[in-house]
Amino acid sequence: MHTSDPAEQARLSARLQELRTEHRDLDAAVARLQCDTGADELMVKRLKKRKLQLKDCIERLESALIPDEPA
């Protein structure tokens, strides 16, 4: 799903940056919660699941932004 439209590429790049920031923030939150012995394990699992979802979205967007190379 590569796009050559500059406006669409800019929109995808901005969204990619937002997702990366959210992923990094979640990573920090999970690390803090895991250091807390009284942390809610369900919350940690939910955050980790969200991180995986973000990672998948990030990979799809990165793939969309990489130009197709001839075989």
Image: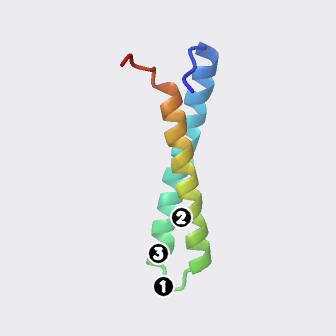
Q: Badge 1 is on which residue?
A: 37
Q: Badge 3 is on which residue?
A: 34
Vertical placement of residue 45 versus 71, above or below: below
Rate crowding at label 2 as few (under 14), some (14 to 19) or many (20 or more) other CA atoms within 10 Å.
Answer: some
**What's the amino acid at mark 3?**
Gln
Vertical placement of residue 5 versus 49, above or below: above
| Extreme residue toward the left, this view | 71
Vertical placement of residue 46 versus 9, above or below: below
Separation of residues labelled 2 and 1 (CA atoms): 17 Å
Rate crowding at label 3 as few (under 14), some (14 to 19) or many (20 or more) other CA atoms within 10 Å.
Answer: some
SS at circle 2: helix
Quadrant for the N terminus in the image? top right
Q: Position of residue 62 (x, y in %)?
A: 49, 33
Q: Are marks 2 and 1 in contact (CB under 8 Å)?
A: no
Q: Earlier in the sequence, mark 2 or mark 3?
A: 3
Task: Kindly identify the residue that appears in the image at 50 percent across and 26 percent down.
Answer: 65
The mark closer to the camera, 2 or 3, is 2
